Image (cartoon, rainbow, N blue to C red):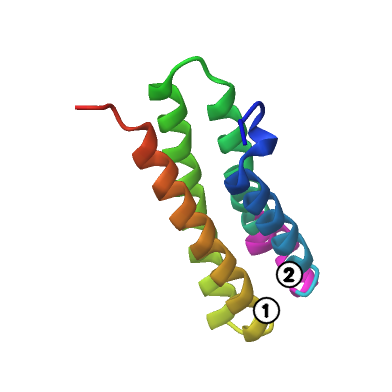
Amino acid sequence: MQVRSYRDLIVWQKGMELAADVYRLTRLLPKQEEYRITAQLIRAATSVPANIAEGHGRGTRKDYAHFISIAKGSLAELETFLLLARNLDLAPRDKCEAVLNSAEEVGRMLTALRSKLAPKT
């Protein structure tokens, strides 16, 4: 299958699913967390597919790789906030674990994509 759009990328599709899962998870957080950890979770989660899309739209492999690196950073931030929410019992542990597992999968895919974009030596 030829990639014509970032929407054809499985890593982008999985990133979108991850972001949707985070939105669903944040509905379970206490209301007082709305402008604290909830906002941070959503921002980090949506940044992952957004950076994949932006990188794909750039003109060079170097730029693309840079945005994939940014997506990986956002993913690490997301995982940190998920672990914090889980450890503070702000959300059900099983739901946090499920989202963390999805995040790990996206992380592996981003790592593979980043390595494919690395300059050939």
Left or right: where 113 falls relative to 118: right
Q: Are marks 2 and 1 in contact (CB under 8 Å)?
A: yes
Residue picked out by circle 1? 95
- Toward which corner of the image does residue 96 lie, by quadrant? bottom right
Report how far apart the C-alphas of labels 2 and 1 lie in the structure: 7 Å
Q: Position of residue 17 (x, y in %)?
A: 71, 56
Q: Residue at x 78, y 66 (%)?
A: 24
**Of marks 2 and 1, which one's residue comes earlier in the chain?**
2
Q: Residue furthest top?
A: 59
Could you say which is closer to the camera, residue 118 or residue 78? 118
Q: What amino acid is labelled 2 in the image?
A: Leu
Could you say which is closer to the camera, residue 43 or residue 105? 105
As helix, strand or loop, the secondary structure at mark 2 comes to helix
Left or right: where 89 falls relative to 31: left
Answer above or below: position of 90 versus 57.
Answer: below
Q: Position of residue 95 (x, y in %)?
A: 67, 79
The boundaries of the magenta stretch are 29-39
Neighbour class for label 2 at 10 Å: few (<14), some, many (≥20)?
A: some
Q: Position of residue 36 (x, y in %)?
A: 65, 60
Main SS of residues in magenta: helix
Neighbour class for label 1 at 10 Å: few (<14), some, many (≥20)?
A: some
Answer above or below: position of 19 versus 66.
Answer: below
Left or right: where 72 falls relative to 5: left
Q: What amino acid is labelled 1 in the image?
A: Lys
Residue picked out by circle 2? 25
Q: Residue at x 55, y 71 (%)?
A: 101
